[in-house]
Image (cartoon, rainbow, N blue to C red):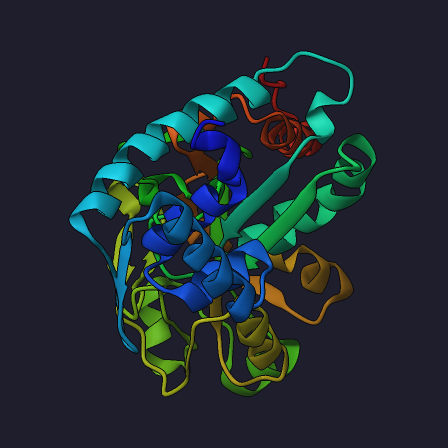
Amino acid sequence: MSLLDRIDLADLRLFLTILRRGSFKAASIELGLTPSATSHAMRRLEERLQARLLNSTSRAVAPTDLGLELAAKLGAGFDMIDAALESLDAPGAARFGELRLNVFADAAHLLVAPALPDFARQCPGVRLTVVVENRPIDIVKEGYDAGMRYGHHVPEDMVAVPLTGGQRWVVAGSPDYLARHGTPRVPSDLASHTCLQLLLGDNSTYSWELGDGERGQRLRVAGSITINDTATTIAAARAGMGLAYLLEARIAQEVREGSLCIVLADHASAGEPFHIYYDRRRHSHPALRSLVNIIRGHHGLARLQ
């Protein structure tokens, strides 16, 4: 009996996940295991190899020299296995496996949520995990198959596919706020208004960009309320707390129903399309390709082949 016959491939995958996530707890959460099951699997693997692979303390996990060498070789091997499985052009292939996405909040609301019914019908066997957060992350290191961001936020070493056309950024306020404070007519009028500050995922405050080309300008606006969540910003604007700088598509319903009004429409700013991005080794993931085509179809873009 060979050594491979005595070792569960799932244990080897777990070993790689622990190294990538940097802790037993994080690996357990990602793989849906209990901490005790994770610890038991690692003990079993080390016993069968008769070698120490990990050094762990209460604060950190680090590979031994042998563990580091094994991880490098296993990574290449699992990449080949994944590529072989994902490239299957067979009935049911698109329903195979798991898909993990990290998306920012506006993309979750505008792109992912509307696509879920079609995705569930096309890929009924796929375990889909969508994590919504605005901070910039390394999707490969943190165990995701793909991420969604604006085009200029996509790392250069990733494959980036546009999911929409360009987006439009506008200033909006509630009818009540505008009745009390007046409607700004030119960008300089914002200096006398209360503006809801936009906090980015890296904890920097975003300057409002108004207009395009030669008419374009970036403004630091005044306001004592800072929010990093679009839904909360919309709620505050609807409540008359101040003017907000938002994606026009994100407030389409509020504008239709009249709870928000766009102001300074002539100074709206054109923004980047939404993009999905992933490591080059994930381009053939069948469920990912299905999701991309569903979203692109919703936004009038051609399917990927």
Tell me the residue at 46%/43% (across/down): 13
**Is residue 121 depicted above or below 236 in this figure?**
above
**Is residue 110 depicted above or below 243 in this figure?**
above
Asked whether 208 or 7 is in front, the reply is 7
Asked whether 103 or 182 is in front, the reply is 103
Asked whether 277 or 8 is in front, the reply is 8
Q: State left or right for residue 204 relative to residue 231.
A: left
Q: State left or right for residue 135 relative to residue 220.
A: right
When asked about the image quadrant of residue 220, the answer is: bottom left
When asked about the image quadrant of residue 296, the answer is: top right
Q: Single out the residue that lies furthest toward the left.
A: 65
**Residue 95 image point, x, y percent:** 73, 30
Quadrant location of the C terminus in the rendered image: top right
**Is residue 239 depicted above or below 274 in this figure?**
below
Q: State left or right for residue 77 relative to residue 82.
A: left
**Residue 248 image point, x, y percent:** 56, 53
Tell me the residue at 57%/22% (across/down): 86
Count of numbered circles in the view: 0
Tell me the residue at 29%/46% (across/down): 215
Q: Is residue 278 visible?
A: yes
Q: State left or right for residue 77 relative to residue 236.
A: left
**Residue 109 image point, x, y percent:** 63, 55
